[in-house]
Amino acid sequence: MTKKNPVPFPYLQNVRKIKGLTQLDVGNKVGIKNTVVSQIETGYTSLPPQRMGSWARTLGVPLDEFSKEVLKQYHPEFYAGIFLGEIKWVWNNTATALVTFL
């Protein structure tokens, strides 16, 4: 999915460069074109969830750490709620959980 207002994902590019990998290296190891790696890093498309494990392995990052960074990038409100304690669960009368942020 191409985004109209891209939000860069600097974490990916920073880790890739620290590890001495090119976009072509990452693309080959993850199984995508290097142009898609570029699009993900620049925010024009999202990292496919089914490729998170291969990205983490390729970048040499533990999957839990990598997953947190992906969550922080794409869903910062959920990241804040889960990891920064800024969430409160409220139950309505149909037993559906509603999330409010403090």
Image (cartoon, rainbow, N blue to C red):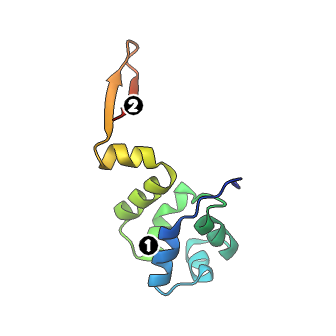
- The answer to which of 71 and 33 lies nearer the viewer is 71
Relative image position of residue 27 (x, y in whole percent): 61, 75
Q: Residue furthest top?
A: 93
Q: Say which amino acid is labelled 2.
A: Val
Q: Nearer the viewer, residue 53 or 2?
A: 2
Disc nearest the viewer among 2 and 1: 2
What residue do we see at 63% from left, 81% from top? 24
Vertical relation: 72 (above or below) 31? above
Q: Amino acid at mark 1?
A: Arg
Q: Position of residue 33 (x, y in %)?
A: 68, 73
Disc nearer the start of the sequence (2/1): 1
Q: Helix, strand, or loop for circle 2?
A: strand
Using residue 39 as the reference point, say whether residue 97 is left or right of it. Answer: left
- The crowding category of the residue bearing disc 2, from other C-alpha atoms within 10 Å (few below 14, some 14 to 19, many at least 20), is few
Q: Nearer the viewer, residue 7 or 16?
A: 7
**Residue at the left extreme?**
85
Marks 2 and 1 close (CB-CB < 8 Å) = no
Give x and y (percent) for residue 17. Answer: 50, 82
Q: Farthest front residue?
A: 102
x then y, percent, for residue 48:
57, 57
Label 1 residue SS: helix
- Residue 24's place in the image compared with 96, above or below, is below
Question: Spatial distance from mark 2 to mark 1, Cα to Cα?
Answer: 33 Å
Q: Identify the residue at image location x=52%, y=84%.
A: 21
Q: Which residue is mark 1?
A: 57
Residue named by callout 2 = 99
**Residue at the spot x=66%, y=76% of the render?**
34
Quarter of the image that includes the C terminus: top left
